[in-house]
Image (tube, rainbow, N blue to C red):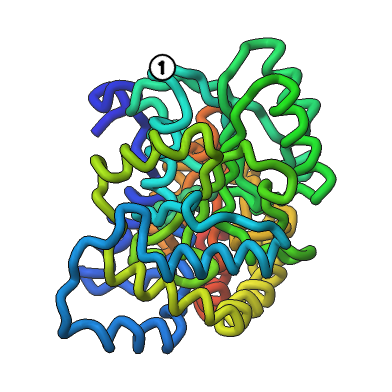
């Protein structure tokens, strides 16, 4: 489908490349999957055990906001990890953070409101907002600034064109950039000063390599917090996440949840309760990503693709301008010729993304090594 046929939406290229890669794999090709941010490991064994134990019983809808035990576990998580008290009634379990975005936009903003996001940024932000009739403002972040958003950039963008909300992730996708505690405090403060509602996408929390993750909740109770079990807990396909909501939008968002989704999937909620107790397992996975990080980043640099080591998440957003001015064509060739799946930068940045490619290092060390070796041959052609 072209962008025009899709009414201004752009395909989610990471998923399109994944579909092409899976097609090649079905034909017998060996593929290195570096295009999606998917942990190679399964969830912790106790997560699987918890689900097995209830499989024979009924699986009714849960409370619309999620099982009380899950919300209690999440409240404990905020107390333990962030030192903040969150009432379990302020929490809604969602079908991944993706459903959290829909609820945040509809619950927190009037129809047609304007939401700011960074460029580059996670593709579903723009596509979901545009698909739902919201307007967007893009705030550029650059390699020169470590891809980090600043309060000054937010204020400058706001003065140029006003917006009602800011949706921001730290660590970020595709760059892995993470702001410091101080910078996050400044971002929260500038949003309060300008009357902008802050949506904090904290999906990569736990995957900061430079220190503990800092939640916006440590600074404010006015932000909408979105998080997920997908990444840190290795549960992408379970489609389970959560939100923490400020009082003024809580009731409206609860009603939307009841009507749009009824409740998050019951089995995945049971799995999520167990996952919260398995942070040691999650840390073991993080140690693998931390080892892959210099391997992939250094390997890409040696191939002639400048890239910084990311602060968090598991991505390398590499400059491929030495080889191409068409990142989508480059990724398609790389897949076809070398069997390496990667995501073109145009997924994240419709202006400059033709010069970048995102590689995920969430896979195994072996996958990183094979991919680098294959790319060496591909680029030497
Ligand atoms: C920044 C960011 N937010 C949200 C998501 C969606 O995650 P979920 O699986 O929780 O819907 C992703 C997935 O890659 C992401 O990178």
Side of 19 relative to 150 (left or right): left
**Quadrant containing the N terminus in the rendered view:** top left
Closer-to-camera residue (217/355): 217
Side of 91 relative to 301 (left or right): left
- Residue at left 57%, top 35%? 167
Closer-to-camera residue (190/232): 190
| SS type, badge 1 | loop
What x and y, as percent, mark residue 326? 49, 37
Closer-to-camera residue (169/344): 169
Q: Is residue 22 above or below residue 290?
A: above
Residue found at the very far right of the displayed protein: 182
Does residue 121 appear in the picture of this structure?
no
Q: Quadrant of residue 241?
A: bottom left
What x and y, as percent, mark residue 53? 27, 88
Closer-to-camera residue (223/142): 223
- Residue at left 77%, top 32%? 189
What x and y, as percent, mark residue 231? 50, 64
């Amino acid at each position: 489908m072209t962008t025009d046929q899709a009414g201004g939406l752009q395909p989610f290229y990471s998923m399109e490349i994944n579909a092409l890669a899976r097609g090649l794999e079905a034909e017998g090709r060996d593929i290195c999957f570096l295009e999606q941010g998917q942990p190679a490991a399964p969830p912790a064994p106790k997560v699987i055990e918890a689900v097995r134990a209830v499989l024979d019983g009924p699986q009714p809808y849960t409370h619309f906001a999620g099982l009380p035990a899950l919300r209690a576990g999440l409240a404990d998580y905020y107390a333990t990890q962030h030192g903040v008290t969150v009432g379990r009634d302020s929490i809604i379990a969602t079908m991944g953070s993706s459903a959290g975005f829909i609820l945040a936009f509809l619950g927190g903003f009037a129809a047609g409101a304007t939401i700011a996001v960074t460029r580059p940024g996670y593709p579903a932000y723009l596509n979901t907002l545009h698909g739902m009739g919201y307007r967007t403002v893009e705030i550029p972040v650059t390699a020169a600034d470590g891809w980090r958003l600043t309060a000054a950039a937010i204020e400058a963008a706001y003065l140029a064109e006003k917006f009602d909300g800011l949706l921001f992730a730290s660590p970020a996708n595709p760059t892995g950039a993470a702001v410091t505690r101080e910078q996050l405090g400044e971002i929260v403060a500038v949003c309060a000063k300008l009357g902008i509602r802050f949506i904090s996408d904290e999906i990569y929390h736990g995957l900061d390599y430079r220190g503990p993750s800092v939640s916006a909740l440590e600074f404010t109770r006015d932000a909408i917090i979105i998080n997920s079990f997908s990444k840190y807990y290795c549960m992408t396909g379970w489609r389970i996440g959560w939100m923490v909501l400020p009082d003024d939008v809580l009731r409206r968002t609860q009603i939307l949840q009841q009507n749009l989704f009824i409740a998050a999937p019951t089995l995945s909620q049971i799995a999520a309760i167990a996952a919260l107790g398995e942070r040691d397992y999650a840390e073991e996975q993080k140690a693998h990503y931390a080892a892959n990080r210099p391997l992939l980043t250094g390997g890409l640099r040696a191939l002639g693709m400048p890239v910084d080591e990311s602060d968090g998440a598991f991505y390398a957003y590499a400059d491929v301008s030495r080889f191409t001015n068409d990142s989508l064509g480059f990724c398609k060739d790389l897949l076809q010729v070398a069997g390496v799946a990667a995501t073109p930068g145009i997924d994240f940045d419709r202006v400059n993304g033709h010069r970048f490619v995102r590689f995920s290092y969430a896979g195994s060390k072996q996958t990183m090594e094979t991919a680098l070796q294959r790319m060496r041959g591909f680029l030497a052609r």
